[in-house]
Image (cartoon, rainbow, N blue to C red):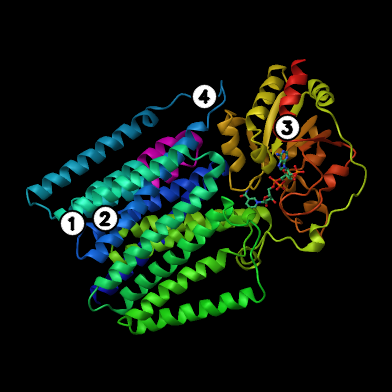
């Protein structure tokens, strides 16, 4: 068996095992932490930095040094920005007063012990290299294994908000160790270090300003932008490798092909996703006649070119055509998707970025990149499937259905009965007399930035001895875990947040449900109306409560574009207006 085949075989074993491990660890991350999970895997996928460091620092020639330099800047932006924003989010999740539990001995000493272990491993490696007992490559291999363990522990920490920050610290330590170890790689040249230093400085500044300054509401577009940077790094490293590898065989060509194709389409696709979410491009789906046919044709040409290159890797013009085709395909894939559906696309692109990273690992025979790429791929895939399931959509419909574009017939809403409205001071009286209140936040709360007012209102009710709970639907808002992050930002302890399955049986005995800018996730048609596009989607069963108050501005539908029959229920009353203004009015009325 050739070395190339042996590397491939070992790489595939590692890829599959890491994928299974990732599946096991990531499915245990609670919905509460799904948004931090997205940014954490994004930061970890910045491990493409180590491949970029080698390409940049080996200083083989100007084109590859420049490609490597850009890749270093992009990947380090992801590492720094991703870890900073994850930590910012995790810091917000707090336990409620009186619920804190004492940390065990192991909990207190685990992280310091890991730090000592890593410092010792790094020191030992440097000593072994210096004494010529081990060559740098061998020492680096063991450091990478340690880093991989730390990454997995880091993701495992996300299975509870209690350990999440400590876990992320371990992942940061793993990243630091992998980067520090790579800097001792014997392929790096003195001149290469200068380029690396500048690239790292640019990435650190860009990443830090993104990670520290971006508001929580802009997390989806930041995540999309980071995927595009990571994917660009993978593509550039792939191009540089293609230029340099002499006597390229079919196996290497396959790995490079995957790296540049997935990297390039993720790069442009993620850029479009970020631009739509930032409203730089229209959020509505951009569609034209025969779109899916054209896309399939392009895909066929792309696959054909790829296969020919595997047959004859020396056809360099075709290689660059392949890169351009993949760039165009990424654009065309995401253009027809509406901005509101972007979170599913972002999770999928997260998965693609992971696969591009893993392919880079195959090209460079770098196993830690295969592991992290596989973990990242698994995480994005699981999140997108969870979102599809919670939205009652198929993955096929997500990719090819031009979703977000509501068919005319479904978009039409007509009054189905009498709608009752309520004023803020009347609501204050109703709340004052209640024993239990459940708050159901939705996308409108995010739009109005009403989380602080709602948290203040809940505190006032709590002070009056009223039992207040928050009910969180897995796809309320526009990204997984959206409501959890917003409420954490408003200092709501996470033990007051109840997931859908836990809270649903409780609605029947709830006096007042306060629906704050949520719509689809409360629509009873999902249970009763087979013709509704929402039919089958699990919902928060607020209609079972004794009374329901909906805070929104009008009778307009939500994301799915369908009327909500809850609003015509005799138990339901509407408090029309911006959710933040309404919350302030209720607080004032309660005080009065
Ligand atoms: P929704 O169904 O989109 O409804 C949001 C409601 O908020 C609207 O009806 C709107 O009504 C109201 N609103 C907007 N601005 C407001 C303001 N300033 N003050 C008060 N109300 C305001 O939201 P949802 O119930 O949270 O459901 C989420 C939807 O997004 C689901 O259909 C889900 O499938 C989809 N989705 C979620 C994700 C995810 O990961 N979370 C991803 C993709 C898609 P007015 O205009 O009348 O005020």
Question: Of discs 1 and 4, which sits in the foreground?
Answer: 1
Specify whether residue 314 is painted magenta. no
Label 2 belongs to which residue? 53
Q: Earlier in the sequence, mark 3 or mark 1?
A: 1
Mark number, residue 438: 3
* Residue 508 image point, x, y percent: 80, 36
Q: Residue at x 30, y 72 (%)?
A: 242
Question: Of discs 3 and 4, which sits in the foreground?
Answer: 3
Mark 1 surroundings: few (<14), some (14-19) or many (≥20) residues within 10 A: many
Mark number, residue 188: 1
Q: Earlier in the sequence, mark 2 or mark 4?
A: 2
Mark 3 surroundings: few (<14), some (14-19) or many (≥20) residues within 10 A: many
Q: Tell whether label 1 touches label 2 (CB within 8 Å).
A: yes
Q: Tell whether label 4 touches label 1 (CB within 8 Å).
A: no
Identify the element where label 1 is drawn.
loop
Identify the element where label 2 is drawn.
helix
Where residue 484 sits, quadrant-wise, is top right
């Amino acid at each position: 068996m050739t070395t190339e085949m042996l590397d491939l075989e070992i790489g595939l074993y590692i890829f599959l095992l890491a994928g299974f491990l990732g599946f096991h660890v990531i499915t245990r991350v609670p919905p509460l932490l799904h948004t931090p999970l997205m940014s954490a895997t994004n930061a970890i996928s910045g491990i493409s930095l180590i491949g970029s460091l080698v390409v940049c620092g080996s200083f083989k020639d100007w084109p590859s040094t420049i490609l490597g330099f850009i890749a270093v800047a992009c990947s380090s932006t992801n590492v720094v920005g991703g870890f900073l924003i994850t930590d910012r989010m995790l810091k917000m999740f707090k336990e409620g007063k009186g619920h804190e539990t004492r940390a065990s001995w192991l909990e207190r000493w685990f992280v310091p012990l890991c730090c000592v272990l890593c410092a010792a491993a790094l020191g030992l490696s440097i000593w072994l290299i210096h004494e010529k007992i081990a060559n740098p490559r061998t020492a680096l291999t063991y450091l990478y294994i340690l880093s991989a363990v730390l990454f997995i522990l880091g993701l495992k920490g996300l299975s509870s908000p209690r350990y999440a920050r400590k876990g992320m610290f371990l992942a940061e330590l793993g990243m630091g160790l992998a980067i520090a170890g790579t800097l001792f790689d014997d392929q790096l040249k003195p001149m290469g270090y200068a380029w690396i230093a500048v690239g790292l400085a640019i990435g650190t500044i860009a990443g830090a300003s993104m990670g520290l300054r971006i508001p929580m509401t802009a997390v989806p577009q930041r995540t999309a932008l980071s995927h595009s940077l990571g994917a660009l790094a993978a593509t550039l490293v792939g191009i540089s490798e293609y230029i340099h590898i002499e006597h390229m065989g079919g196996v290497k060509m396959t790995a490079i092909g995957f790296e540049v194709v997935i990297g390039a389409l993720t790069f442009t696709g993620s850029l479009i996703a970020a631009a739509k979410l930032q409203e730089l491009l229209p959020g509505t789906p951009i569609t034209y006649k025969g779109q899916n046919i054209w896309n399939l044709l392009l895909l066929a040409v792309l696959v054909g070119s790829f296969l020919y290159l595997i047959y004859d890797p020396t056809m360099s013009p075709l290689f660059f055509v392949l890169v351009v085709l993949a760039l165009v395909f990424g654009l065309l894939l995401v253009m027809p998707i509406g901005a509101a559906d972007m979170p599913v696309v972002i999770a999928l692109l997260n998965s693609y970025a992971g696969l591009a990273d893993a392919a880079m690992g195959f090209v460079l025979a770098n196993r830690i990149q295969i592991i992290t790429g596989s973990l990242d791929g698994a995480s994005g895939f699981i999140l997108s499937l969870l979102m599809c399931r919670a939205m009652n959509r198929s993955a096929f419909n997500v990719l090819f259905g031009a979703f977000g574009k509501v068919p005319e017939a479904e978009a039409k809403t007509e009054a189905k009965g009498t709608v009752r409205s309520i004023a803020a001071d009347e609501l204050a009286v109703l709340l004052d007399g209640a024993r239990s209140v459940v708050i159901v936040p939705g996308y409108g709360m995010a739009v109005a930035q009403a989380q602080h007012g709602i948290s203040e209102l809940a505190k006032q009710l709590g002070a009056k001895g009223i039992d207040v709970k928050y009910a969180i639907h897995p796809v309320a808002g526009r990204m997984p875990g959206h409501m959890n992050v917003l409420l954490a930002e408003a200092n709501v302890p996470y033990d007051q947040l109840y997931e859908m399955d836990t809270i649903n049986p409780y609605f029947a005995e709830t006096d007042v449900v306060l629906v704050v800018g949520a719509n689809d996730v409360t629509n009873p048609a999902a249970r009763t109306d087979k013709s509704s596009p929402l039919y089958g989607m699990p919902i928060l069963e607020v209609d079972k409560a004794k009374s329901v108050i909906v805070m929104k501005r009008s009778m307009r539908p939500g994301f799915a574009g369908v009327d909500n029959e809850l609003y015509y229920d005799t138990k339901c009353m509407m408090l029309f207006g911006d959710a933040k203004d309404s919350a302030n009015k209720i607080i004032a009325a309660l005080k009065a």
